Amino acid sequence: MKRTLAAGIAIWRQKGILWPFSMVIRAIKCAMYRVPRGLIVEPSQGCTGNCAGCHIPSQPVILNAEQLETWLETSPAKPVTIHFSGKHSDPLASPEINKLAETAEKNCSMLSVSTIGLGLKQAHVYLPVDRWIFSIPAATEKSWEILRGNKRFMEAIEAIRTVRQSSRAMVEVVLTLWKASVNDIEIFNQLAMKENWQHTKVVFGRFDPEGNHFGRLENIALDHKASPYILRNNSLTLEKDPQGCPLAGYLFLDATGTLRPCPFTGDESPHTATPNRESWNTAKDWVRQKRNREYPACTWCP
């Protein structure tokens, strides 16, 4: 809640006194038409990390601005927030990111982007986004190298510095804990003070049964006392039964232009690649299923 409030205040200062009213009107319209208030958009299947053990398509699919605009035009209500993110991908890998950002910014009240911070180009710094979220898997060069299999820790730190110095957007840095970085919290806090990061958060890495990226079982921070996962009978499970869905208010548009309940549900769950009003009406019921955690992927989402 504090993060959302801080982001709202920062954007309010930039967009003027009338911005909250336009955002409230959008939120009311979404509620009236039972459309989720947020849309997570995957700009590309590609990634900039080049991490060991992470497999991305040899020819990544790229979402273009026309596809995004068609989906937004057919929705009965424009989203309050649009968030550029991915599953095993990074938004900065998309050559269409600038056009996508311009399209999104015209059709929402708050635009944010989540990135690992690698491959940042000068043009990225001036994207019309309201909030940058840099997700780093480690706070030391050693733990970074163990996880990613490369020595690009300082590149990520420099990217955060560059955006903070040149962009008016809110910048948040998130440390995602894995087995190799489970002891990095205090170091992360010290780094945040040194770099004067105003907005930070620590979260746990999510288990991915597909095993295609960091979420492999051997990377999960099981030894931390606050880990949401435990190993029981040689099988990973959530320690506590989760309440509701953390992404209940969002839908996910992947790089192929397919609308899904969230980034973690795959082809075994309902999805549609047809941008029209009927697809949005069908997606309304997905929200109820997410809240009740009826999808296979909900087994692993803490």
Image (cartoon, helix red, strand yellow):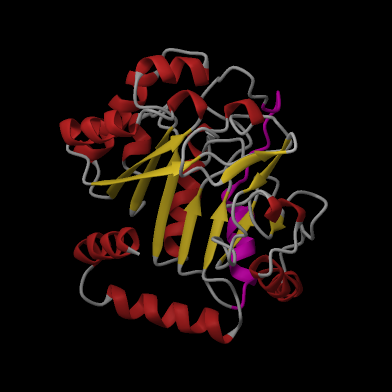
- In this picture, residue 23 sits left or right of residue 166: right
Can you say whether 29 is above or below 269 in the image? below
Image point (61%, 41%), residue name: 230
Question: Is residue 128 visible in this depiction of the protein?
Answer: no
Q: Position of residue 223 (x, y in %)?
A: 51, 32
Does the magenta run of residues contain 140?
no
Can you say whether 65 is above or below 120 in the image? below
Pick the front one: 230 or 288: 230
Can you say whether 94 is above or below 27 in the image? above
The image quarter in which residue 249 lies: bottom right
Image point (76%, 53%), residue name: 296
Residue range of the region highlighted in magenta in the rendering: 56-76
Does the magenta run of residues contain 61?
yes
Q: Position of residue 48 (x, y in %)?
A: 51, 26
Q: Position of residue 84 (x, y in %)?
A: 50, 49
Quarter the N terminus occupies: bottom left
Image point (30%, 75%), residue name: 20
Tell which residue pokes out farthest to the front in this image. 233
Pick the front one: 248 or 202: 202
Can you say whether 17 is above or below 185 in the image? below
Q: Position of residue 195 (x, y in %)?
A: 19, 32
Image point (52%, 72%), residue name: 78
- In this picture, residue 291 sits left or right of residue 15: right
Question: Is residue 182 visible in this depiction of the protein?
Answer: yes
- In this picture, residue 88 sits left or right of residue 107: right
